[in-house]
Image (cartoon, rainbow, N blue to C red):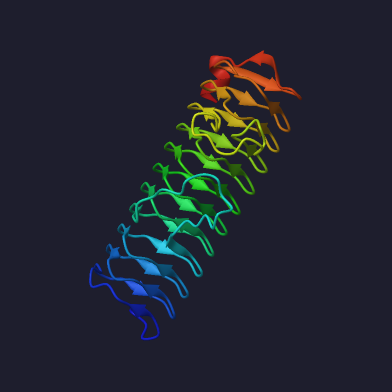
Amino acid sequence: MLQKTAIIETNEIGNNVAIGHYSVISAGVILGNNVIIHPHVVIEAGVIIGDDVEIFPGAYLGKRPKGTGAVSRKIDYEEKVLIGDNCVIGPNTVIYYDICIGNNTLICENTSIREKVTIGNFCLVSRNVTINYNTNIGNHTKIMDLTHITGNCEIGNDVFISVLVSTTNDRAIGKLGYDEGRIIGPKISDGVAIGAGANILPGVTIGEKSVIAAASVVSKDVPASKMVAGNPARVIKDISNSEQAG
């Protein structure tokens, strides 16, 4: 059902689509089949929504990044967003332009996803997560509440990142301006698990299937299949094959 109070400028609407009161769907939006758009959703031109997607109230898809002179990084993006089949976009989520989200992914409420981000299939991005620019996230990865994923970050497949985790990308803490070759976020490899409140510092690589204990400060690379803990984080044990399988 298309509510009369909604502003619908696109004609590219699939079968069995519902658009709620006071939503704004711009010209150039493509909606798949069986899409549910709740009230007060804004979707800008260039956004493509797959089949069986549900978008909850207050979400904004296709936000244009603004620098206003306060940001030293050059803002660069394409006016496109792709949301895969069978996704859910939670209330008050803001998805900027130049985003690709795979199939069967859940984006929970109050999440912010900046430009040039890709998120894979079967992922979970939980409540109040922020994902900054130019970041890639693999398949089957979970990022829990109130975690910050920094810009220029790489996250692999089957990664679990617990609540209140912080990642950063600038060891100069903003004092040297923006340099693409220097501002580098962590690389978190496949199968990594990161405990609550951990802090992952710029440029660190965490090897496959490693475990970062809660509240650790990771300031240097972590080899594959190791557990680290502490401030600064140090290797405390090897991760056995049976632990990895579990």
Q: Is residue 225 above or below residue 26?
A: above
Q: What residue lies at 60% left-to-right and 19% top-to-bottom?
A: 221
Q: Residue furthest right?
A: 231
- Judging depth in this view, the residue of 96 and 109 nearest the camera is 96
Query: Which quadrant of the view contains residue 111?
Result: bottom right
- Judging depth in this view, the residue of 142 and 65 nearest the camera is 65
Which quarter shows the N terminus?
bottom left
Q: Is residue 63 above or below residue 141?
A: below
On screen, residue 83 versus residue 244, left or right, reads left
Q: Is residue 64 above or below residue 167?
A: below
Which quarter shows the C terminus?
top right
- Across and down, in percent, residue 154 comes to 48, 33
- Across and down, in percent, residue 207 comes to 53, 20
Q: Residue furthest bottom?
A: 4
- Across and down, in percent, residue 144 comes to 60, 45
Q: Is residue 146 above or below residue 6?
A: above
Q: What residue lies at 45% left-to-right and 56% top-to-bottom?
A: 96
Q: What residue lies at 49% left-to-right and 34% top-to-bottom?
A: 180
Query: Which quadrant of the view contains residue 13?
Result: bottom left
On screen, residue 99 versus residue 232, left or right, reads left
How many numbered discs?
Answer: 0
- Across and down, in percent, residue 36 comes to 38, 68
